[in-house]
Image: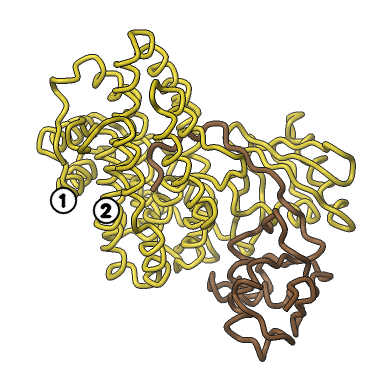
Chain colours: A yellow, B brown
């Protein structure tokens, strides 16, 4: 494979020839190196400087690629086929001719229904999706992933392309900031509303973890090349919903069903089951989204948000424990690992995976708004149960 | 067994390339390689090795094929505590945008 930095990647020495950092707006990695690898890192950092000065098309030196290879599992590097082809024009044309997101969101809504989301929610998901026009650049993904001959596409290359698009989508919508703004605005209304808002967030985590097995299980039979890993993943996921139940109980919530399920989270799980039912790359990308990055900082941002809520300290302990279990299990690299096992794709398979990932991230971008609306009208318009 | 003295019967670089090739279906020579001096290993300590997926697969492969790839009896726990000498070591990863309410 060839390694190429994402355009957002910046690098610098913290301690010359020994300690350095690589960062994008969504991830920062600090690392140490020595010996000949220090030279390779130096070449990489010089290349990143060249790119930052405007030489965006500069060829990536061989030594820089060797350094980048060490960071392939992180969302900062494109991997591309070593013997690259040009996507056949006929592939690109036929693969990108579905302008409407409505059919896929109807399927996602059905997936959410199968996972227990009530009809009011599934109707909402389908209605929102029907107005969306696809935005992710399919032709570019095909071009970067084409193998020799131009009729098949490398799954790892496509994965690294899509994971950047996903992060850019989050960045564009400024999701973490918007979520924090919602929390701040609701917290200003009083402790009870603040606590209820955060408990509602935890209730979404409970829905996600409690529906994980049902959403992922179709992959065991439909995606046989991934079955062994999926089976192991399901074992590792078992019991995570119990942690969320404990967190809810710490907030005084006896049953998750007394708080509303939000369309954003139901749609995300609908997208997961849809991917598990037929798109290997879409499934790998979905799990990459759900599992996040294996950060090494001590407490999760989510746990911190929960701890800041009145009476949230104990609930935050359970949230943080879930986070630590996933990090210890290396779940942040799970999607990337799956992508390495996927056979070359057709153009249609690649595009279907990208559409699924775009849908998942569009759904995710609804979260802060849904949360705010749940606080505005806690007893109206948003379904309970599930 | 002291994991610091774990010896791999064949070069870890070769093994890593082989595993990467097997996993991805691409020729092994195209696979990312660990540095050639990564034949012996050091303790894992607090760090985890870069290319974690590749390293994990490599060591699991070594554990599954001990007569081929290791000169010592080696357990999975030993292997997971072990990291190749000479690689870049990741010491901190932060993700400022991650408020993972949706974590599985």
Look at the picture and state if B19 lies above or below A385. Answer: below
Q: Are marks 2 and 1 in contact (CB under 8 Å)?
A: yes
Q: Which secondary structure lies at badge 1?
A: helix
Look at the picture and state if A344 lies above or below A106. Answer: below
Direction bottom: furthest residue: B67
Residue at image coords 30%, 53%: A212
Q: Which mark is residue A325?
A: none
Q: Chain of mark 2?
A: A
Residue at image coords 86%, 46%: A18
Which image quadrant is residue A102 in?
top left
Q: CA distance from mark 2 to mark 1?
A: 9 Å
Q: Is residue A93 visible?
A: yes
Side (left or right) of A17 relative to A269: right
Side (left or right) of A296 relative to A164: right
Which image quadrant is residue A75 in?
top right
Counting residues from the N terminus, which is met first, the one under dot 2 or under dot 1? 1
Q: Which residue is mark 1?
A: A114
Q: Chain of mark 1?
A: A
Sort mark 1 into few (<14), some (14-19) or many (20+) by Cα contacts within 10 Å: some
On the rendered image, what quadrant is the N terminus of chain A found in? bottom right
Sort mark 2 into few (<14), some (14-19) or many (20+) by Cα contacts within 10 Å: many
**Along the line of sight, which residue is nearer the eye, A76 or A204?**
A204
**Along the line of sight, which residue is nearer the eye, A260 or A80?**
A260
Q: Which secondary structure lies at badge 2?
A: helix
Residue at image coords 72%, 42%: A30
Task: Measuring from the top left, give residue B50's x and y in whole percent.
Answer: 68, 56
Q: Which residue is mark 2?
A: A273
Task: Measuring from the top left, give residue A303's x and y in whole percent.
Answer: 47, 34
């Amino acid at each position: 494979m060839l390694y190429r930095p994402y355009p957002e990647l910046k690098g610098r020495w913290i301690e010359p020839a020994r300690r350095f950092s690589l960062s994008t707006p969504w991830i920062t990695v600090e690392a140490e190196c020595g010996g000949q690898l220090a030279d390779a890192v130096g070449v990489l950092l010089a290349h990143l400087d060249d790119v930052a000065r405007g030489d965006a098309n500069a060829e990536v030196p061989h030594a820089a690629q060797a350094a980048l290879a060490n960071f392939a599992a992180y969302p900062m590097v494109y991997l591309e086929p070593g013997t690259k082809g040009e996507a056949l024009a006929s592939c690109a044309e036929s693969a990108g001719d579905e302008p409407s997101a409505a059919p896929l969101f109807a399927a996602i809504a059905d997936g959410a229904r199968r996972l227990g989301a009530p009809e009011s929610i599934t109707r909402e998901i389908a209605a929102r999706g029907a107005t969306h026009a696809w935005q992710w650049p399919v032709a570019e993904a095909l071009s970067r992933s084409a193998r020799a001959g131009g009729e098949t596409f490398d799954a790892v290359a496509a994965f690294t392309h899509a994971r950047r698009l996903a992060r850019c989508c989050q960045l564009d919508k400024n999701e973490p900031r918007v979520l924090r703004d919602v929390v701040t605005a609701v917290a200003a209304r009083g402790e009870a509303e603040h606590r209820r808002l955060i408990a509602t967030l935890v209730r979404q985590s409970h829905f996600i973890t409690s529906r994980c097995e049902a959403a992922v299980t179709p992959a065991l039979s439909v995606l046989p090349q991934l079955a062994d890993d999926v089976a192991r993943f399901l074992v590792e996921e078992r019991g995570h919903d119990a942690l969320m139940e404990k967190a809810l109980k710490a907030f005084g919530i006896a049953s998750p069903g007394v708080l509303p399920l939000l369309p954003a989270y139901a749609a995300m799980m609908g997208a997961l089951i849809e991917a598990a039912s037929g798109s290997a790359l879409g499934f790998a990308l979905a799990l990459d989204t759900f599992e996040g990055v294996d950060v090494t900082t001590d407490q999760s941002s989510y746990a911190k948000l929960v701890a800041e809520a009145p009476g949230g300290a104990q609930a935050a302990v359970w949230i943080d424990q879930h986070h630590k279990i996933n990090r210890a299990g290396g779940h942040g690299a799970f999607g990337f690992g799956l992508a390495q096992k996927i056979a070359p794709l057709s153009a249609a398979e690649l595009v279907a995976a990208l559409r699924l990932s775009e849908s998942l991230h569009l759904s995710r971008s609804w979260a802060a708004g849904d949360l705010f609306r749940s606080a505005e009208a806690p007893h109206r318009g948003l379904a309970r149960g599930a | 067994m002291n994991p610091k003295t774990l010896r791999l019967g064949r070069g870890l670089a070769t093994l890593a390339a082989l595993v990467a090739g097997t996993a991805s279906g691409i020729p092994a020579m195209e696979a990312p390689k660990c540095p050639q001096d990564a034949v012996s290993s050091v303790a894992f300590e607090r760090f985890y090795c870069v290319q974690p997926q590749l390293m994990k697969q490599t060591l699991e492969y070594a554990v599954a094929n001990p007569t081929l790839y290791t000169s010592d009896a080696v357990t999975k726990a030993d292997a997971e505590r072990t990291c190749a000498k000479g690689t870049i070591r990741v010491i901190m990863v932060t993700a400022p945008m991650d408020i993972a309410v949706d974590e599985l």
